[in-house]
Image (tube, helix red, strand yellow):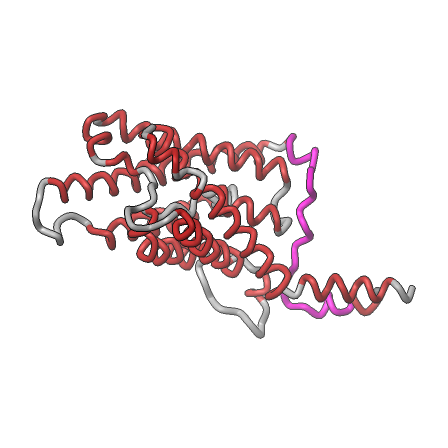
Amino acid sequence: MTQEVATEAAKDYHEPPPAPFIDPKELTKWSFYRAVIAEFVATLLFLYVTVLTVIGYKSQMSRSSDPCGGVGVLGIAWAFGAMIFVLVYCTAGISGGHINPAVTFGLFLARKVSLPRAVLYIGAQCLGAICGVGIVKGLNPNYYNNNGGGANELSDGYNKGTGLAAEIIGTFVLCYTVFSATDPKRNARDSYVPVLAPLPIGFAVFVVHLATIPITGTGINPARSLGAAVIYNKEKAWDDQWIFWVGPLIGAAIAAFYHQFILRAGAARALQSFRSSTHV
């Protein structure tokens, strides 16, 4: 035990304790509910801007024979990545800047957030996404419906297994980046890399969209997919909806396990602690 304390004291970074599974005191604080509101508003803004970008591009393509017309797939990917960068930057100090149920789920599995916080965050994100897409449709219903509503659907030529794999891998990349960019060990003298955390997270969203837009339209965010499906409300969007929940949640779980137990050696530390306790 003395050796463990000495080792902890020798570290030049602070390792925060695991979040409690349920913390009753948390529910009595205004900061908790302020964070939930921040997640709602951020996800609303995220869906408003990105869905408008998607349907705007489709509208331009339907009215022009120029394959380079509109913002293109590159522009859509930039819209998603840039909005995540902006919103994570704005909300990180309030709620942690999750803006994605898969990210919240991964952080919960890694014991970075409590169960009540995770549940309320996910609820706020889903509600914010629905409201954000609802505003887009409210501005011009015909324009919205005629251009696909920004809904995530499996593209022709791909089977559901391929779509699921794309969502798992894409969300793994995103959540792995989130864990790495927010790792407290980055402050250690021997491994410090100056980084603005929202920047690599936004770039992760950008590159994943470039890779998977042709396959699934890119979900990697169950709230984004749900919000568009609820407001667009077409059969194809609902038939494929499970892919955009199961895939991201699996990808987030794998990222949490990989970072906590492989990169941060959580399993080795637990085993060492167990072995030490057997000799007490």
Number of numbered discs: 0
Q: Is residue 6 above or below residue 114?
A: below
Quadrant occupied by the C terminus: bottom right
In the image, taking residue 128 as reference, residue 107 lies left or right, namely: right
Residues 12 and 100: in front is 100
Tell which of 59 and 75 is nearer to you: 59
Q: Residue at x 69, y 52 (%)?
A: 17
Residue 86 shows up from this direction: no
The relative height of residue 2 versus residue 59 in the rendered view (above or below) is below
Q: Is residue 231 above or below residue 259?
A: above
Q: Quadrant of residue 146?
A: top left
**At 29% from the left edge and 38% from the top edge, which residue is drawn?**
150
Residue 9 falls within the magenta-colored stretch: yes
Q: Where, quadrant-wise, is the N terminus in this rendering?
A: bottom right
**Was residue 203 drawn as part of the magenta stretch in this picture?**
no
Residue lying furthest right: 280
Magenta part of the chain: 6-27
Q: Is residue 264 left or right of residue 87?
A: right
**Residue drawn at the location 53% of the way across and 37% of the way down:** 121
In the image, residue 57 sits, relative to residue 1, either above or below, namely above
- In the image: residue 39, left or right of residue 112: left
Q: Is residue 150 visible?
A: yes
Residue reaching furthest to the bottom: 190
Q: Find residue 111 and report its horizontal and vertical position in percent.
A: 64, 49
- Nearest to the observer: residue 22 or residue 253: 253
Residue 24: give x, y in percent of width and height.
Answer: 70, 33
The quarter of the displayed image where residue 169 is located = bottom left
Could you tell me residue 277's position as x and y percent?
86, 62
Q: Percent position (x, y) of residue 263?
A: 59, 66
